[in-house]
Amino acid sequence: MKLRTRLLLMLLSTSLIPLLIFSGVSGSAFVSTSRQSIYQLNKDKLEVAKAEINGMLEKNFNTLHIIANQPAVRNFDIENTKDVLLGAKKANPDIIISLADAQGQQVVRSDDDALINIGDRGFFKQAMSGIEECVSDILVAKDTGNLIVVIATPVRDMNNNIVGALQASIGLSQVSEFVTELSEGSTDVYVLSRQGTVLAHPNMEYVQNQEDFNSLEFIQAGLAGQNATLKTANIEGEEVIVSHALNQQAGWLIAVETPVAMAMSSSYKLLNVCVAMLIAAAIIVGLLGFYFSRRFTKPLVDVSSIIKTIADGDLKDFEVKVNTKDEIGELYHSLKTMTENLRGLVSNIQSVASNLASHSL
């Protein structure tokens, strides 16, 4: 291997290896930090979603509790109860409130739809058993056929005996509108029922089709009460970061989902810029290494050529452009002096030989 090649490799290795190590370590740390930041951002969005959904449920339950404690409601004064429900409807236009007796027969509603019997509904039975805050599974409304969830609370008479139930029906479309408002950019907020089916989602087709999300790896753990943030695949097979938490009161699984490609896009762009800069730096280092190795070895190559000429017996004068005062310059000048001395010595030998030859004649 030529000296120039060895010198170039030495320059490249001493320059690029530390650069590559630094770039690899810093790049890995950057990606890891970015991923942690995105995980934390997803968790923060989940906390906001939890607070908003908990607030929605709390607000509606507070409305029911206030109404259930009204004397007209406790005494089943239908006319005055209707006025109370109409007043509540003005403040809460997104819910339909109705009062049912102990047999589950609705006696008054906040709207003008038909009165129905809810005695077979699970939420009604829970309310009649004394559970203060009941949340139903996803139901098909008997009067409209729409998908709804129902919250309910017991109604007690003046002697504190349970005599009926007060319910509020919430359409899934309204809950989906609510989570759509919470979703922003590429992030989706959605809610799953106790059975793992879609209760609310920005994509209404999932709600209307009651899409089953139980095939996703985090669903069972989430419904069991394990809150976590992880990288996984969503229902469409896209790689996403999911944060999920269980609302214990309703049994709803609240999830915040962000596609990895979108979440890491800015980080990957910056990483690509760093890689491009690394490649550019490697090219520059390579060109500089080639230039300096050639400049450093050229005088040595010239001197080597002169030495070969001298070894062949040619002591002619030579001139090499060496302007440096370093060891290479000293080598050149010493070689030049040696050649001149050899040339003088050979000249003297030839002169002596000629004299001897003339005397011998």
Image (cartoon, helix red, strand yellow):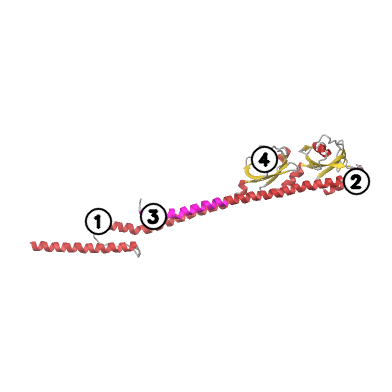
**Mark 1 lies on residue:** 311
Cα distance between the residues tagged 3 and 1: 27 Å
Q: Which mark is residue 221?
A: 4
* Residue 170 point in image, percent of width and height: 79, 42
Looking at the image, which residue is at 18% across and 64% down?
348
**Mark 2 lies on residue:** 71
Mark 1 or mark 2: which is in front? 2
Looking at the image, which residue is at 43% across and 57% down?
288
- Which residue sits furthest front? 159
Task: Tell me: 218 left or right of 98.
Answer: left
Cα distance between the residues tagged 2 and 4: 44 Å
Cα distance between the residues tagged 2 and 3: 98 Å
Total marks shown come to: 4
Label 1 SS:
helix
* Residue 219 point in image, percent of width and height: 67, 40
Task: Tell me: 240 left or right of 5.
Answer: right
Callout 1 amino acid: Ala
Residue range highlighted in magenta: 3-30
Callout 4 amino acid: Ala
Q: Earlier in the sequence, mark 2 or mark 4?
A: 2
